[in-house]
């Protein structure tokens, strides 16, 4: 393993990575994102896009990008690497090694190229060697929380490349931070919370902070 990939420095404070609903109305989504940004420290937003024609998707990205980027957060598209520059996004999240390998050359070095859908340690190591800016665990073929914690802990002990751990529920945030996640991704756990997006995002960020202080 190249030395540059090994974890040698103290990791930064973990941060929140929001994952939007795909079918959300753009106006309502902007409102929800503003509420989340006002109530919590958000590092990045993964924008899931609905099925639509390319022009409509680009327009949707352009509607959302300023809201996210004005808060110094990165807007990452879930797939659609060809739309990143045209929509003004900061990067793309690719699912699986093949999709990543196909897109990484068009994204880097100017844009973020993240990867999820990593079902094995081998796939994760290949992603690291292929230039991924981050890896995400827990977003595909959802494992048990125990298995996810084990994978995150292994990565944090060995690699320098940031790790995003996907929390299916707010209660999973603390264990994933303590395992060594650099970012915790949350989707419906925030956007479908009956309390509303703002209190849910604040709750998620608070859990990250409390878990970090306990490590």
Image (cartoon, rainbow, N blue to C red):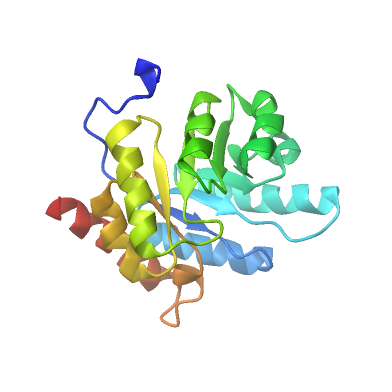
Q: Where does residue 57 sit, x and y in percent of width and height? A: 77, 52
Q: How many labels sit on residues?
A: 0
Q: Where does residue 3 sit, x and y in percent of width and height? A: 34, 16
Q: Is residue 48 left or right of residue 19?
A: right
Residue 149 falls in image quadrant: bottom left
> Is any atom of residue 81 visible in this view?
yes
Q: Is residue 169 left or right of residue 76?
A: left
**Residue depicted at 58% across the width and 44% down the height:** 76
**Residue depicted at 50% across the width and 36% down the height:** 122
Seen from the viewer's position, the closer of residues 49 and 9 is: 9
**Residue depicted at 41% across the width and 64% down the height:** 144
The outermost residue toward the top is 3
Q: Where does residue 71 sit, x and y in percent of width and height? A: 45, 47
> Is any atom of residue 181 visible in this view?
no
Q: Is residue 199 above or below residue 79?
A: below
Q: Is residue 104 above or below residue 83?
A: above
Q: Is residue 137 above or below residue 109?
A: below
Q: Is residue 172 left or right of residue 188?
A: left
Q: Where does residue 173 sit, x and y in percent of width and height? A: 32, 61
The outermost residue toward the bottom is 194
**Residue depicted at 67% across the width and 23% down the height:** 105
Q: Quadrant of the N terminus?
A: top left
């Amino acid at each position: 393993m190249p030395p540059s990939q090994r974890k040698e420095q103290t990791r930064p404070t973990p941060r929140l990575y929001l994952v939007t609903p795909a079918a959300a109305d753009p106006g309502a989504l902007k409102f929800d994102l503003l509420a989340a940004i006002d109530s919590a420290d958000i590092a990045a937003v993964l924008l899931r896009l609905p099925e639509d024609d390319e022009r409509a998707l680009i327009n949707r990205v352009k509607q959302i990008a300023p809201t996210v980027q004005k808060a110094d957060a990165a807007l990452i598209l879930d797939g659609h690497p060809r739309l990143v520059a045209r929509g003004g996004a900061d990067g793309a999240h690719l699912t699986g090694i093949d999709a990543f390998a196909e897109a990484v050359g068009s994204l880097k070095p100017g844009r973020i190229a993240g990867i999820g859908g990593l079902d094995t340690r081998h796939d994760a190591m290949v992603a690291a060697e292929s230039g991924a800016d981050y890896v995400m665990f827990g977003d595909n073929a959802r494992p048990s929380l125990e298995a996810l914690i084990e994978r995150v802990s292994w990565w944090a002990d060995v690699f320098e490349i940031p790790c995003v751990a996907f929390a299916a529920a707010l209660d999973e945030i603390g264990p994933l931070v303590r395992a060594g996640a650099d970012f915790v991704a949350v989707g419906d756990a925030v956007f479908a919370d009956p309390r509303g997006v703002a209190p849910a995002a604040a709750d998620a960020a608070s859990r990250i902070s409390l878990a970090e202080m306990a490590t």
